[in-house]
Amino acid sequence: MAIEETAPVTDDRRWWTLGVLCLSLLMVIMGNTVLNVALPTLIHELDATNSQLQWMVDAYSLVFAGLLFTGGALGDRFGRKGLLNIGLLVFGLGSALASFAGSANQIIACRGLMGAGAAMVMPSTLSILTNVFPPHERARAIGIWAGVAGAGGAIGPVTSGWLLEHFWWGSIFFINLPVVALAIGAGAALVPTSRDPGRTPLDPVGAGLSIVGITALVYGIIQAPQDGWTDGSILLSFAIALVFLVTFGWWEMHRSAPMLDLRYFARRGFTGGSLAISLVFFGMFGSFFLLTQYLQLVHGYTALGAGVRSLPFALTMMVVAPLSPRLAEHIGTRGTVCTGLAVAGAGMFLFSRAGVNSSYLFIAVTLIVLASGMGLTMAPSTASIMSSLPLAKAGVGSAMNDTTRELGGALGVAVLGSLLAGRYTHELTATVASLPSTSRDLALASLGGALQVAGGLGATGTNLAAAGRAAFVHAMRVTLEVAGAVAWIAAVVVARVLPRRVAPSEVQPRTGVREVDA
């Protein structure tokens, strides 16, 4: 990788640069969600097993989360634009190979390769943005960046559904190739070079410890709902994560030039912003996990139809997130973030009122409230993290922001998914008691399984289908009430941690940040 010089404080091309960065970001975010809609097709086309389907989805997240800190540190050391381009090329290569894969295992490997590319792309986008925009414009730019990041999760399934209806299954991967080409081509002219001018030495030991620790942690979180939170393999995974992450912390504390300076956590803007980001993604990923099943299995929409009906979330996010910095100017970072968490919690409680026959208008209003709260939270929290670090460490700060997103999202799906499954099984057990054991187990495993069993029972299956939908809706209600309570508790906790305002200095030295409580 070629060494790059530090970018100027202000670049006339900066808003065009932001467009290229958001395009790259959108591709990475969609890469995390675009496969879900295609899973039934891949069962038919590649004879994929349930385990293979799970790993097609999880391989991306696992590699992505594990390499984020290393990717951010490499960008700071060798150059963020260079790492962005390498990440785009790796992502594109994985996409090209996945497009024409001949087996499920090949797709799993390609998804891991795409995750590695994404781990270089995502922290590079935010760190370049932070270096390109001057302090008085940075929060606004981060707001746009956050809006795109939040909307990407909803846009992915729509894009995937449309492609599957018009092209072959590999098109959901192949579509990334022109995006990669456009991002690299436009970036050559519009994205400036930047890196840490101090040329901080590499920390291979710290990188290795962080990769193993975070990967083990994310694996345990992802696998726990399937194997059980007390399963031996899950406990072993969490134990490995604890040992390696504690060792990572000890190692970083004793290095003169650490990859992640743990003293940053003493800064309330850094810690409070990280906490808020993780909790808002806990709610967002968990809510979308429930929403997708609710729209498709309870209301009977197709995958594409469900994706289209989730667009109010994406549109609201793209409007509210860029506006949140203006609100923060008036009521402060803390006030804006806590208001966002409170509104998101209200949206979850509102969503919990959805029933089997609720109108789409009610669902759309719920999505708008949810997205408004999350949009208010994301941008100021991200700005708080980035403003708490020296510009030279923007890559590591971006990686921290992205890692907390991944951990929060994985926890949201795992914890809320486990709670949903437990309540659903409890509600439906009596109804399926008379069924043969195979059918009973399938019906209790998921609402999709219950509907499959009901479809094979003829006219008598109508009651089972209705009972399954009612059990799912009740379980979803309890789960969302818990999620809403978590969001409201988070608002109180963050209010005590996050400073009222985080004001970056024009030139950020090692301690160049002011945290203002009044």
Image (tube, helix red, strand yellow):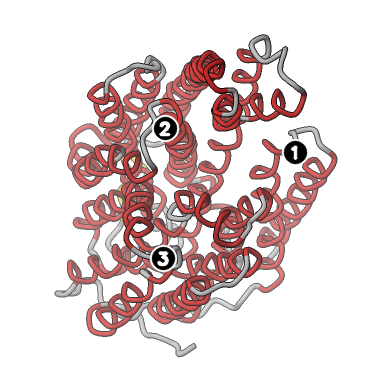
Q: Nearer the viewer, residue 109 or 439?
A: 439
Q: Is residue 445 left or right of residue 165?
A: right
Q: Amino acid at mark 3?
A: Trp
Q: Nearer the viewer, residue 254 or 171?
A: 171
User: Residue at 36% of width from left, 52% of height from top?
Assistant: 161
The residue to which callout 1 is attached is 227
Q: Secondary structure at mark 3?
A: loop
The residue to which callout 2 is attached is 291
CA gap, disc 1 and disc 2: 23 Å
Q: Amino acid at mark 1?
A: Asp
The residue to which callout 3 is attached is 168
Q: Nearer the viewer, residue 70 or 369?
A: 369
Residue 344 horizontal/vertical position (percent) = 35, 28
Up-down: is 511 above or below 110? above
Which tag, 1 or 2, sits closer to the chain's start?
Answer: 1
Number of numbered tags placed on the structure image: 3
Q: Is residue 300 left or right of residue 20?
A: right
CA gap, disc 2 and disc 3: 26 Å
User: Residue at 32% of width from left, 25% of height from top?
Assistant: 343
Mark 2 against mark 3, which lies toward the viewer? 3
Mark 3 against mark 1, which lies toward the viewer? 3
